[in-house]
Amino acid sequence: MKIKRCPIMFKNVISARITTESENWYEAAQGLRNAVIRNGLYGTGPVMYQALALEPKTNKVEYNFYIPVSEPVAMEKNEQYQFEETWIVQDALVLRHADLDESIEESYELLRACAEAHQLTLQEPFYNIYLDVFGGGVIDICAPIIKEG
C-alpha cells in the first residue's frame, strides 16, 4: 500500500447530511447523485463521504456526503444541504482502500500510524472518496493534516 501526501480540490460541491444504516451508505450516496440529476445538473467527480456519528442502539450513522456538480448552485445554507464553490483540503495523506470487503478501519489505522511516524496530526473523521472502477469500486481515504511537528 502506498500513502501519498497531496492536496484535494473540487469545484461546485453540493453536500448533504444524511442518517442511514451503516451498510446502506451507498444507497444514500446514490440518492444524492439522483437528486442532482433530477435538478438538471450532473456530477463532475466522485461521491465523497464522512461518517460523523454512530447511533449504537439503531446501527445508524450520520454521514456528510459531497458531490461536485456541473455548475454553481444558488442555495441557502440549511441543516441538510449546502453548496461550496471550492471544496479544498490543502494538505492530506491519501491511501487507496481497494478491497471493499475488508474493514476500512484497518486502512484508517495505517494512516494514523504513518501520521504518528512523521509527527503529523490528522483531522478526523476522514473523507472517503468513492471511485467507480471496473464494475466495482475503490475508496481513496483522504486524511487532512492539521499540524506538522
Image (cartoon, rainbow, N blue to C red):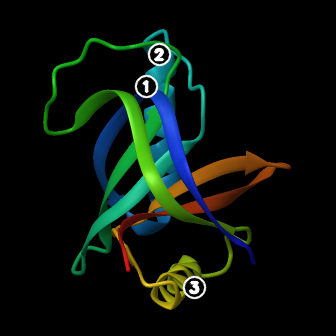
Compared with 34, 138 (above or below) is below
- Quadrant of the rendered structure where residue 144 is? bottom left
How far is mark 3 from mark 1, CA to CA?
35 Å
Amino acid, disc 1: Ala
Tags 3 and 2 touching, CB below 8 Å: no
Q: Nearer the viewer, residue 133 or 119?
A: 119
Which residue is most to the front? 149
Amino acid, disc 2: Arg
Residue depicted at 39% across the width and 58% down the height: 50
Q: Which residue is mark 3?
A: 110
- Quadrant of the rendered structure where residue 86 is? top left
Q: Nearer the viewer, residue 53 or 148?
A: 148
Q: Nearer the viewer, residue 70 or 62?
A: 70
How far is mark 2 from mark 1, CA to CA?
5 Å
Q: Mark 2 or mark 3, which is nearer the start of the sequence?
A: 2
- Would residue 13 be found to the left or right of residue 95 on screen? left
How would you rate the neighbour count of disc 2 (Cα within 10 Å): few for under 14, some for 14-19, many for 20 or more? Answer: few
Residue depicted at 54% across the width and 79% down the height: 111
